[in-house]
Amino acid sequence: MDLMADRHFPPPIKNESLDMQPPAYDQVVEKYEIDVLRRPADWSLEGGDLVLTDDGDIKVGDDIYSAMFRLVERWRLESPTLEALFEAAIVSKARNDRSAQRLDELGSLAVTDWTAFAREFRSANEEGGTHELGRSIYAGTIFLVHAKLLSRFLKDLRMSHDSAEKIAPVREGLSFFAIVKAAANNFRHHDEWARTRRNGARQRHSIDLLATALRNYLATPEIETRGRNVCAEVLEVVSSSSYEGLNRNLFGFAKGAAEVARLAVNSGDAS
């Protein structure tokens, strides 16, 4: 029996998705209009020695060029996997919706054949639950990867998270980075949040931020963001249900942060 063919299982990541080639560097620069990278830069030297990034890479150009260069290089290598995860989340949502429809259609069966109703109810309920959890896992993993990607980018820019959370709003006045960071926290800690009677300031910050991001999307966002994994719903609103939409918000934020960093350098201020 092919277990992966069973409808209860979330859609597997297909082999052809993992065989995808990463987008070419020049194509990424052109597609997302990353002007700072349109011209190549040299390795950074100081006193005749190569300058290294905090994590040991050879630094290319100044802080801003280096930050954007490393973001693009890391992202394009991760992109095939991120896209496969995104597509799996979309498929899981469709299958979960199908399960909900099956449940709605079972009502009359309860009157005519209780045994069959119980069997089909359990099957549809398990199918829906499996795809609902699978969808949230796919989405949560995407946010974890983006959170790490952007945290390294901000360190390269010498920019604080507080400053970054005010840049390039994409949803309800919230920045892409703020939403990504809060969603990653939700994925890691939603069980802990649900058990805690009084959430601390850091927990409340993420919970309140996600509730704002999901306003007009969930019926009770203040309750749901505290008690469960809402990464799948956050992924929908921050991407407009499109992998390309997610990418444009990512690079829109990155370009906005780089611009703020450049203005700070030119004015002599620190972020």
Image (cartoon, rainbow, N blue to C red):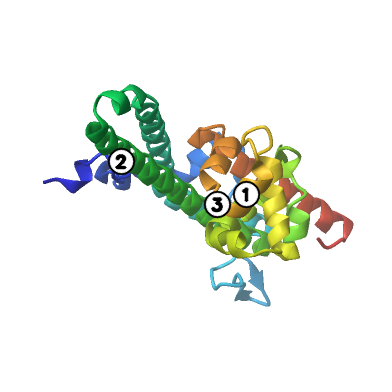
- Tally of marks: 3
- Determine whether, in the image, residue 198 is placed left or right of residue 232: right
Looking at the rendered structure, the secondary structure element under dot 1 is helix
**Residue found at x 59% / y 36%:** 237
Q: What residue sits right under mark 1 in the picture?
A: 225
Residue type at mark 1?
Thr
Q: Earlier in the sequence, mark 2 or mark 3?
A: 2
- The reply to whether callout 1 and callout 2 are in contact (CB within 8 Å) is no
* In the foreground, 87 or 79: 87
In the foreground, 123 or 168: 123
Q: CA distance from mark 2 to mark 3?
A: 22 Å
Q: Which residue is mark 2?
A: 122
Image quarter in which the C terminus is found: bottom right
Task: Identify the disc placed on residue 228.
Answer: 3
Relative side of 178 to 102, left or right: right
Q: Let me know if residue 209 appears in the view.
A: yes
In the displayed structure, 184 sits above or below 6; it is: below
Q: Of helix, strand and loop, which one carries label 3? A: loop
Q: Where residue 201 sits in the image (x, y, percent)?
A: 75, 64
Which element is circle 2 on?
helix
Residue appearing at x 31%, y 42% in the figure: 11
Cα gap from disc 1 to disc 2, whole angstroms: 27 Å
